[in-house]
Structure formats: structure tokens, C-alpha cells
Amino acid sequence: MKKKIPWLFPIVLLLLDWPSLDDITTGKEPDLTGEYLVLALSIPLLLAILFLLSKKSGYS
């Protein structure tokens, strides 16, 4: 169970990013500020998680 927990947060972030990208590409939202904000906040978080997971597993 402990090995699955670190992967849960990135999966949730990607599930939040997917609708944001869909709204940006299809143009269904009149104001895309929220969608761009979600993407701008999730990219550094995903990179930090990737770095921590790779450091923990010994790949870096």
C-alpha cells in the first residue's frame, strides 16, 4: 500500500489537467484563466514529484 500512495497524487493531478486541457483546446470556456492556472500549478508539482520519486528509487 505504501508504494501506491506516492503515485496517487500525480494521477489525481493528471486527472485535473485533462479537463483543463480539453477546455483550452475546444474553447468551451469564456474565461480560461482557471484552466491555465491549474496547468501552471500542476507542472512544477509534477516535476517535483518526479524528482523525489526518482531520487527515492535511486535513478538520479
Image: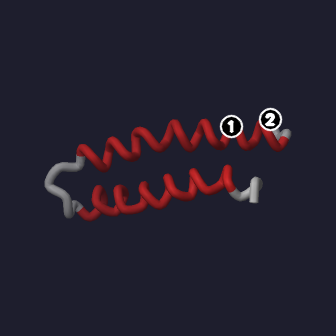
Where residue 47 sits in the image (x, y, percent)?
A: 59, 39
Q: Quadrant of the C terminus?
A: top right
| For residue 28, above or below residue 10 | below
Q: Specify the amino acid type for callout 1.
A: Phe
Could you tell whether 20 is left or right of 4 in the image? left
Q: In the image, residue 44 lies at what x, y percent?
A: 51, 36
Q: Is residue 31 left or right of residue 35?
A: left
Quick check: 59 above or below 28? above
Q: Dividing the picture into quarters, in which one does residue 57 lie?
A: top right
Image quarter for residue 40?
Answer: top left
Q: Quadrant of the N terminus?
A: bottom right
Which dot marks residue 9? none
**Residue shown at 26% from the left, 64% from the top:** 26
Dot 1 crowding, Cα within 10 Å, few <14, some 14–19, many 20+? some
* Figure quadrant of residue 52: top right
- Residue at the right extreme, as displayed: 58
Total marks drawn? Answer: 2
On screen, residue 60 versus residue 33, left or right, reads right
Give how far across and how far down residue 25 sits, in percent: 30, 60
Residue drawn at x 19%, y 58% is: 29
Judging by the rendered image, the residue that carries numbered circle 2 is 60
Mark 1–mark 2 contact, CB under 8 Å? Answer: yes
Horizontal relation, residue 14 to residue 54: left or right: left
Q: Dot 1 corresponds to which residue?
A: 51
Q: Residue at x 42, y 61 (%)?
A: 18
Under tag 2, what secondary structure?
A: loop
